[in-house]
Every structure is written in structure tokens, then in C-alpha cells.
Amino acid sequence: MQSKTYLIEVGGKTLTAEFNDWADQANGSVLVRYGNSAVLATAVMGAKESTLDYFPLSVEYEEKFYAAGAILGSRFMRREGRPSDEAVLSGRIVDRTIRPLFPKGLKRDVQVILSVLAIEDYDTDVLAVTAASLALSTSNIPWSGPVSAVRLGLEEGTPDYIVYPTYRQRDEELPPKARMDLTACGKDGLINMIEVGAREVGEEILEQALVRASAEIERIQVWQEEIIKERGVEKAAFTQPENGAEVAAAFAQIVEPMLASYKGIFGKEELGAMKGEWMKKAAEQFADIKPNQLDGYFEKRLDEFVHDLAIKEGKRVDGRKFDEIRPLFAKAGGISPMIHGTGLFYRGATHVLGALTLGGPEAAQIIDTIETQDGKKRFMLHYNFPPFSVGETGRVGGMNRRMIGHGALAEKALRAIIPAKETFPYTIRIVCESLASNGSTSMASVCAGTLALMDAGVPITKPVAGIAMGLMSAQGGSASGRMSDGLKKYKILTDIQGPEDHHGDMDFKVAGTSDGVTAVQMDVKVEGVPLAVLSEAFAQAKKARLQILGVITKEIAAPRPNLSPRAPEIISMKVKPDQIGLVIGGGGKTINGIKDITKVDEISIEDDGSIFITGKGGAAQAAKAMIEALVKEYKPGEVYDGEVTRMMDFGAFVRVGPGKDAEGLVHVSEVAPFRIDKIGSALKVGDKVRVMIKEIDEKGRINLSIKAVDPKWAESKGLTPSTNAGPTDRPRRP
């Protein structure tokens, strides 16, 4: 085996790139390590051009169960199946980072596969970006990298950023709690991909974090460039497909009059009509030109038109001001009493319904992936994008990468305001249905989800809103897509809609409360965006977010005071860890008996003794009372109504509660203030009697007294002092 290794220190540990002959049939490959985590990246380009009208890039992020050193997966099929949501999201990070750096017009298939070979404390998604970059950069595949990635963490109460934080440092449930988890990718001082989850972090902190991330990215880029200089090969020849003057003339004849009639103001319908007319007439006129080339030419010219409209004429395609939000509408509830909470949110022609369901702790999703094993997820947000939402027909059912990504982003945005399990032990599931889409349904899902949470009476800390920002730059329509020069030639767009998202340079989504940001996601179509432009976008996004929050809080100012009557009741309590076995009973007999008697939905017991009881109609309260009685710790002086369970010569055993230690002895001397001959003359099995706990001995045994409660009890039963001579004391239990 041939290999060579390159090293760089990042975050106090060594980042390693090993080039070997493992996958020597691929155009490029590399093994990247950090700590005990390792990713193998391979890049392959197809030999022939695709006939598709888009660049056929596929990025596959493959998690291998062996990477975690555990046998995972279904108990019936111990092998990898469909990618986990985590794998899909990690693949999307790599895809969104590397895609803008391929030359426009490239139509050959390119496939990048990231195989996670080992994983421990550090997530491999950031490693995968660097690995993909090195595999592509050292190959002959046309690509303008390298690009680098870094993850920064910020813990509660600490001012310093953590470079490459561990899973534990990123866990919001464990102290110290993570205040921010930021992943940024970029090159040449530009940022081209951002993922942020945070707990109401100010924009200024995020900007500082991006500056810090950019410095780390530059260090890794220099390291990559040295490797590429040594190992890189000549790139395959690629020339931009050119169309002659005849095609340009045809476009001027067919499309430009339509643009003029719209006066530069058009939406999805008008765009669809223009493209349909162009493809029909151009195909008839240029039979020798492939349809994908005609499609590509249309997109190129529309890109130029939309950019010129913004940069040169100061206009948006729908006539709005650059910082203007489309008409807003918010409604909380009113769908059906069957649903525990609903929210309906409109932003222009983008309409999203959020539907919320509450369940007990046992309804939490079990997480069993290479990143997290035996974990539980108590807050979930799922996103659906049916074809009717864009006026099309198509496949219904199942999840795709887009749905998983949009749902994860909205979930991340709302996670910061979800109440702690200790105060609100419910499992929460929100489903966001995209009913109509014309830009940023993910941020509309954040708003609809907030409305549903408050309608359900979930005690969230604050409402959250989200907004999608866009960018039109003078370089956006160019072949290079660089923004390193001419920074004054750009416009930031608030609330981008369909054509602006499709033809623009940036999709910058920001969600948060009135006090700070909770989630950020950025994708670009140019090589990257300067930090100064991002800072301006943050400020403009905050203004929009506050406006949307005003509309939401006007509809519903705070969570409703009570949960839906359809929602289950959950009561929490706590027992000592050594009492858990008592509550469960042998083979679950005791806990199942409580369920059968009270008809509760579920009783969840955690290792620390926390118990969550879920039920309706008072069932949870009844189960709690039974458990409290079961684990009750008895004290001298307490009075109980008990039942005689056993008789001995020296006294009677009386049960005062359901627990195994809830039986005590009434010694014959504790029945009456005078001597009686036989205990059987006073009591028998099954008698109900009121007793007081006189003492609890060193062995935990309970000694009871009847006379201490009622000195006249014996007389009321017709008992008289014994006339037998002898000692007054009687034998006690051994």
C-alpha cells in the first residue's frame, strides 16, 4: 500500500489527510481523520455528458454501523438501510458547500461519496466537507476549490468559542448547556455555507463567531493548497457551451417582448409561461441544439435580467422594496378540536399549516444512530411538501432530502423555546404542511409552528419567527460567480419569493425571538459572500423578524392558559432510586396492576427515580396516589386505618398501606391501657382498626398501638382487665 499523510492542528487536535491507494479507481480520494473519527471521501466524474437540464451532482453521506463500534440497526436486519436523518443532513451540508464551485454549464455526472469509517466524540460532517474538498481538488474534475469547514461552539456563561466541540459540549440537555452550535464553510475570505442552532444569541455574537470561523477556514485552506500543489493533477478540459447570435436573436424575439409586457414584474406563473413559450419555439427553430442547452440559455439570460433589474434599475421582480415583506396573515387554532394545537401562517403566496400533538414521555422518538445510541427525542418537527403546493402533480408520500432538511431547520429554530422536561414533560410533535409555496416554506413553518405551540398551551418562553433573505450581486450572473470585488454592487432582499430564490445568489434564512437568533442557514450560488454583506443581511433580517413577530403576537400574545381538553394529563413525581424496583414489582406486576386499576395511558420511570404518569379523566392522579402510598416512608406519631392480616400469640400484624414495608405489629400490650389475656379476644384477621405508629426500630420494623389512638377502644369492644396473675410484659416478635 502506498500512502502519504499531511497534518494540521485544529482546535487543539490533529487533523490528518491521508492519500493512499485504497480507492485508486476513483478520480480522487482521501482519508481524513480527527481524533478517533475518520471519513473516506471519493469523487468520480462520468465519461459522458448528461442530457438533463441541470448539473447532475450527487453527494452521498454513508454512515457505517461499524464506525460506532456497535451492532446497530433493526433487530431483524443488522445492516445499513436507508440513511438516517442525521446522514441526510450531513450530506446536505457537503452538497451545499461544494455545489457552487463547479463551473456553470457542466453536465457530466459527478458523484461524491463520504463513507464514515469511524466516529467517536466529534461529528464527521465538518470532516466530510474538508475530505470532499481534497478529493475534488486533487482530481481532474473541474472544480474551483478548495473549500474548508469549521464548527464552533459556545457554552452558557463562557465567552470563548470552542473549535470542533464534542457531542457532549453541543448537548443542550447537559450542563454546561450549549448556547450556540455554528458550522461555517468558505474560501478566500468568503463564506458560502452556514448552519447555526442557538439559544437567542445576538447578531453581533454571530458576526464575531463568523470572523473567528473565517480565520480557521483560512488556515485550513492554506494547508489544503499546499497539498493540492503537491498532489493535484491537471483538470479535465471544460468549456462553457456557447450559443450563437441566432439563439440570442431568437430570445430577443420570443422572450424579451414578454418581459417588456410584464414591465419587469413577474412571478411563478409568468416565469413558467415565458419558459414554456421559449422552449416550444426555440426547439422548433433550433432542432440541432439539445433541449438542455436551450433550457440553460434561458436560465442564464433570466439570471442576467433579474440581476440587472436589481443592480442597475433598483427593482425587484414583483415590484416590492428591497426590505419589504409580502402581506402577512396568522391564525392560531380553529381547525378542529381533535388537534391539540394549530397554526396557519401566510407570507404572500406561501401558506403553511402547523399541527401539534402532545403525548407522554414514552411517545418520544428513540434515536439509534452511529452519532447517538439509545437516545430520546421529545420535540419533533416534520415537514411535508406535497406537489399541489406548487400547482403540480407528482409522487405523494415518503420523505426526500428537501423535506428532511426543511423540517430539521424549523425544528432547530423552535427548539430553543421548548420548555424543559422537568416543567413540561410532554413529547411534542409538530407537522408543518406546505399548502402553497412561493419561497421559504421552511421559515413559514417556523411561524406556523410557533402559532401551534401557543394555541396548544405549551408554555414556550417566547414566540419565534423566521425570514429568508436574498442577494443580487453584480457578479451573480458571471461565469466565476466571485464577490471579491465590487462590493458596492449588490442588493440584499428581504423575504425572497420563487424567482428571486431561483435566480438569486443567496438564500439566507434567519429565525429567532425578539431577543436573539435561534437558527441560521445559508446557501449560495456564487463562490461565497463577504462577512460585511452578511452583517448587513443580519441587520435587515432582524428588522423583518420583529415585524413578523408583531403579526404573530397580535393574533395570540402568549400560550393559552390551559392545554387542549383532548391532550393527555401528565403528572410528574419522584421516588428514591432504590424504590424503583418496588414500583415496578417482579416482572412488572406492580406497575401493570396500577395501570389496570387506574386505566392510565402510560407510566414512565427514569433511572434517577423520576416518574411521569400520562392519563385522562383523573386517571393520572389516581395512579400517583397509588405510587405515593406504595413508596411512603412512615414516621412515628402518624395515624392510619389498617387491616389485620396475621395473628400471633404476642400480637396482631396490621397493614397500613400498599408497600411491602407497610405492615406493623400491634403488640398485645398496645391494645388496651390494661392487661388482656389473649390478642384473639380483641382482634381477628380482616378486622379494620385505627392505629398509631409508636416507633420504627433499627431494622425498619413498625410497631403500632391502638390504645395510643383511642384508650377506650378495648372497653368499647367489651374487653375487661385480665384477672390472671403474672408479669404484665409479653413476648415481642423476634
Image: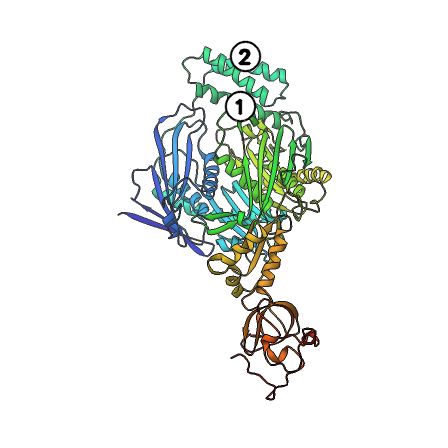
Where residue 34 appears, as percent x and y from the top left, is: 41, 52
Label 1 vs label 2, nearer the camera: 1
Q: Position of residue 133 (x, y in %)?
A: 42, 41
SS of the residue at dot 2? helix
The disc at residue 253 is 2
**Rendered location of residue 417, percent (x, y):** 62, 48
Amino acid type of the residue that numbered disc 1 sits on in the rendered structure: Glu
Residue drawn where x is 53% and y is 14% of the image:
277
Can you name the residue that lies furthest to the left here?
1
Decide if residue 25 is on the left or right side of residue 541.
left
Give the total of numbered labels.
2
Q: Mark 1, residues whose alpha carbon is within 10 Å: few (<14), some, or many (≥20)?
A: few
The one of 730 and 723 positioned closer to us in this rendering: 723
Most extreme residue toward the top is 285
Q: Nearer the viewer, residue 730 or 92?
A: 730
Q: In this picture, is 212 found above or below 440?
A: below
Q: CA distance from mark 1 to mark 2?
A: 29 Å
The mark found on residue 392 in the picture is: 1
Q: Residue at x 55, y 83 (%)?
A: 731
Q: Secondary structure at mark 1?
A: loop
Residue at 66% across / 71% down in the picture? 638
Q: Is residue 176 visible?
A: no
The answer to which of marks 1 and 2 sits earlier in the sequence is 2
Among the 4 quarters of the image, the one containing residue 309: top right
The amino acid pointed to by label 2 is Gln
Residue 718 drawn at (x, y percent): 68, 75
Residue contact between numbered discs 1 and 2, judged by CB atoms under 8 Å: no
